[in-house]
């Protein structure tokens, strides 16, 4: 399942994302998608979690946390396209 982090710093690093998850072994992949023209960065985190209740709890726990003074908007989308399926995504 996935967690989506919106409003992340434009230059966020994978390590900063891992720090949010306390370097949990449940973190399977991190994909950082940035639009450098308008400083909008979305972070997708794929977790080894099969329970909707658990993933929602993780998103709720992280929502409103701060990285470098920027308040994050964290959610667990119910329906969406897998961001790793499309090679044309702008990722870094």
Image (cartoon, grey):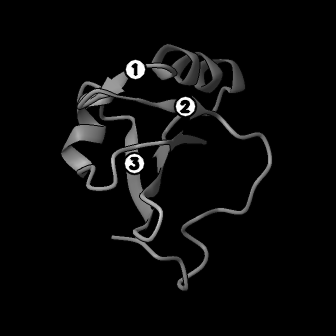
The image shows residue 36, relative to residue 86, as above or below, that is above
Q: CA distance from mark 2 to mark 1?
A: 9 Å
Mark 1 closeness class: few <14, some 14–19, many ≥20 residues within 10 Å: some
The image shows residue 71, relative to residue 84, as above or below, that is above
Quadrant of the rendered structure where residue 59 is? top right
> Sequence order check: which comes first, mark 2 or mark 1?
1
Q: Say which residue label 1 marks.
A: 65
- In the visual, does 21 lie left or right of 44? left
Q: Say which residue label 2 marks.
A: 74
Q: Residue at x 40, y 20 (%)?
A: 65
Foreground tag (1 vs 3)? 1
Residue 32 point in image, percent of width and height: 40, 59
Q: Say which residue label 3 marks.
A: 28
Quadrant of the rendered structure where residue 21 is? top left
Residue 3 point in image, percent of width and height: 55, 39
Secondary structure of residue under mark 2 = strand
């Amino acid at each position: 399942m996935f967690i989506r982090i919106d409003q992340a710093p434009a230059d966020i690093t994978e390590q900063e994302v891992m720090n949010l998850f306390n370097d949990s072994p449940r973190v399977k992949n991190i994909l950082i998608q940035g639009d450098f023209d308008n400083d909008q960065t979305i972070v997708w985190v794929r977790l080894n979690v099969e329970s909707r209740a658990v993933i929602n709890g993780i998103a709720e726990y992280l929502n409103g946390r701060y990285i470098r003074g920027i308040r994050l908007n964290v959610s667990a989308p119910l329906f969406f396209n897998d961001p790793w399926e499309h090679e044309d995504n702008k990722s870094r």
